[in-house]
Image (spheres, rainbow, N blue to C red):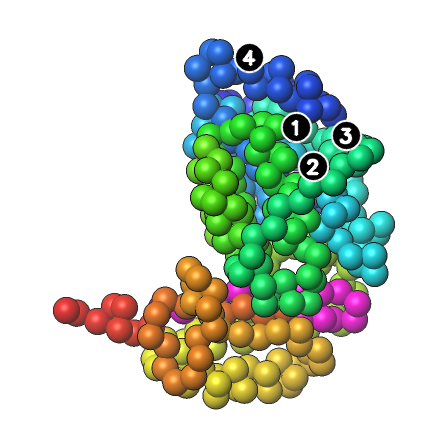
Amino acid sequence: MPAAGVDSQMTLVRTVGEVRAIVAKWRAEGLSLALTPTMGALHEGHLSLVRRAGSLADRTIASIFVNPSQFAPHEDFSSYPRREAEDLALLKAEGCDLVFAPSAEEMYPEGFQTSVSVASISQGLCGASRPHFFGGVATVVCKLLNQVRPDFAVFGEKDYQQLLVIRRMVRDLDMPVEIIGAPIVREEDGLAMSSRNAYLNADERRKAGALNKVLAKMAERLARGDDVGETIHFARTALGDAGVASIDYLEVRNALTLESAGSGALTAPSRIFAAIFLGKTRLIDNWPVEPAWQHAPR
Ligand code: PAF
């Protein structure tokens, strides 16, 4: 695939039939394919996924689809940022080969009635406050993977629970694709990049910068063996002091299974998960914890 910035040919298609025809031709030529599913409003975080996809396969495909089935009626589906022209220019500059931007009717034609549900790993964290969310994500990602049939699909670790849900689905349904997780890309003050950051006013944006710093401090404390409950208490207070009035969740869980860490010092590789509200905007972030024993000489 051409290097970033090279004036490559990029094709935009809107139907499953067109995607299948192009992909079939590439397959016949023996080319490998990597897909980056997105909901558009692309930022550097998405572009890092597209670059990762480009490093993995001969042809890079991105999808842009604001998936209605992963939004509850009271959520921001209608106001979710849509900037297709800018997104296409960004994808072209990254050397993306094919963009699939279907309509809602193309993805969910009349009579559509199937959904994919991934059980326990979808529960808790974002699944608790957004019970519809992972069913919608799993269903649309399953469809995209069936439509494109890529060798690789790349997802950001920013939505860590989503990444684990998708990995589980792919394993459980024997889908022939390798799921690649890519690291969170952060703003200068450490705020995890998100299309929803655009909703924040200046005051909320300043407060948002506290979240990653508090998570990093938590990780430090947990790594040296501090009690999980006490560390969460410390972090809640620190977030409150930084002006974050509403915490949806702040939890420490097993990094692979998402089981709750319980109390005392950590005994397994773990991850801190947080969701906060700043005004009406809900932001999520997560941070790995590497307990000291993981690095201890044997
Ligand atoms: O992470 C996202 O942007 C979406 O949840 C995804 C994976 C594109 C499915 O709509």
Q: Taking the image as drawn, is residue 27 in sight?
A: yes
Q: Residue at x 53, y 86 (%)?
A: 234
Query: Which disc, if any, is residue 25?
Result: 4
Of residues 248 and 200, the one nearer the viewer is: 248
Q: Nearer the viewer, mark 4 or mark 3?
A: 3
> Residue 220: x percent and y percent?
41, 76
| Residue 232 on the magenta segment | no
Quote the CA–CA distance across marks 4 and 1: 16 Å
Q: Residue at x 48, y 85 (%)?
A: 229
Mainly helix, strand or loop, the magenta region? strand
Question: Magenta part of the protein: which range?
Answer: 276-290
Q: Nearer the viewer, mark 2 or mark 3?
A: 3
Residue under label 2, please give it: 64
Residue furthest to the left:
298
Q: Nearer the viewer, mark 4 or mark 1?
A: 4
Q: Earlier in the sequence, mark 2 or mark 1?
A: 2
Left or right: 268 with respect to 182?
left
Q: Earlier in the sequence, mark 4 or mark 3?
A: 4
Of residues 120 and 79, the one nearer the viewer is: 120
Q: Residue at x 77, y 46 (%)?
A: 68
**Identity of the amino acid at label 2?**
Ile
> Residue 286: x percent and y percent?
53, 64
